[in-house]
Image (cartoon, rainbow, N blue to C red):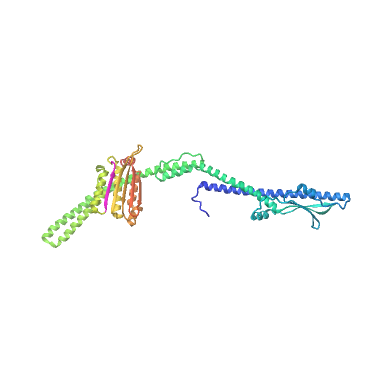
Amino acid sequence: MRNWSGSDLKLRLTLRVAAVATLCFAVISGYFLFDSDRAVRARIAAVAEVAARTLELQQNKIQWLNNPHAEFPDLDSVAASVMAPGLCLAFRSKGGEISQRFCGGAQTDTAAPPLAFAALYRRLFDPGREAVRPVVARGHTIGEAVVWVDPAVLTAEAWHDAGRQMAVLMIALPLLCALVYAALARALRPTLLIRNGLARIAAGDLAARLPPFDLAELSAIGDVFNQLAERLAAALSDRNALTQKLILVQDDERRHLARELHDEFGQSLAAIRALAASARLTAIQDCPPLLAECDGIARTAADMMETLRGALFRLRPPDVDELGLAASLEGLIAGWNGRSRGQPRFEIALSGSFARLPASISANLYRIVQEALTNAAKHAGATRVVLRLEMREAASGSDGEIALAIDDDGRPGDPQADLQAKSGMGLLGMRERVAALGGRLSFEAAQPHGASLRVVVPLAAGAAAAAVERAA
């Protein structure tokens, strides 16, 4: 069975109308064939009746004139008035012998029907069937008037009529299909608007609305579409506000954790280093073999202090409000280059002025870049990471937008990289931050290796995010 799931609705409806029209035409053609056969039966029955009455009159006249030598039967008068192509008229005596017969010749200009049609027609109508009427004289049946039509003639006439009907069908059916398709195309034209509206909704444009339509069904769909778009926009706005609050809470928790680590754990490490230095001085005088252990404790404490500084830097980045987004990102890139000792190498390219960028956008973009660089360096094993930040001015009076692009040459098949790209908390956090700002984020694996992160945030989102921050 053919799968119609991807076919055009107008084409499907047009084909169904064509199928119904063909079926109706076939039924009408069959009715005409049956009606024609019935008319032929009635005609030969009437001819048989006339022939029987004529022969009865002839027999009565012979008996009344007492002329036994008169010619009987005489079908010339009847044949002259009723004879038609293929029509046969005969008198059959009581013994079954044909005493006299007249047959009209077949038309020579009628094309022979196909064998299949001839067999079907003969099976349905039995065109060689006879019409018989008794001839009665003085209350006794002396014979029968027999009338029939040559089956070949009837079949040829039926095929001729069917051919004309098929010619009409061949002309009318394409015209009907064209008219139906044009009418359906006009009636379903609003579905293009509905599809475009759904595409805009899928692309994130929740301001898409459908106009009222002439058809009640499509107008109802448009009303439901507009209601769903409004509810989705309201739900997304509430979700973005809640996400922004959660991000603010998360940042507060990070700052609190960084402060606790610095005040408690940092002081403890400093105390350990001081004790190790004091023990080393004592060991120099009293127990020189302990110098190696003291130095090991001091190195371990120094390494832990370095690790703590990196964690504190990630938990509590430099104040973006004071330094600005551009300077903060340049410092972040410089820090990564310093820690990586040349591998991987990080590059940054800035385009435009970021001095008046809203604080909420600056802080979130910094967090996004921080997470993306960590993913590229630690999980994807990238050897080269390029960061591009561009300020795009508005073309028609709007606030413009800021575009962030991060490209790396990491291993696309690495399991940890796949985890970050598909379901990792890092990418999820970036998506939430971008969604809270009303922006767009896309992540694509490059060929043959590497990955690309794209973020576009409208500057108008900064005012809304700042209002949420003040409310929190």
Q: Which residue lies furthest to the top in this view?
A: 397
Q: Is residue 282 left or right of residue 330?
A: left
For this rendering, which residue is in front, 153 or 179?
153
Q: Is the magenta stretch mostly helix, strand or loop?
A: strand
Q: Which residue lies furthest to the left in this view?
A: 285
x then y, percent, for residue 388: 30, 46
What residue is drawn where x is 77% and y is 48%?
Answer: 80
The stretch drawn in magenta includes residue 350: yes
x then y, percent, for residue 363: 29, 45
Q: Is residue 347 left or right of residue 165?
A: left
Q: Residue furthest front?
A: 108
For this rendering, which residue is in front, 159 or 355?
159
x then y, percent, for residue 233: 40, 42
Can the viewer see residue 91 in this picture? no
* Count of numbered circles in the view: 0
Q: Which residue lies furthest to the right in this view?
A: 66
Q: Quadrant of residue 229?
A: top left
The stretch drawn in magenta includes residue 178: no
x then y, percent, for residue 240: 36, 44
Q: In which quarter of the image is residue 286?
A: bottom left
Point out the image quarter for the C terminus.
top left
Q: In this view, does 81 lie to the left or right of 239?
A: right
Which span is picked out in magenta? 344-353
Q: In which quarter of the image is residue 470?
A: top left
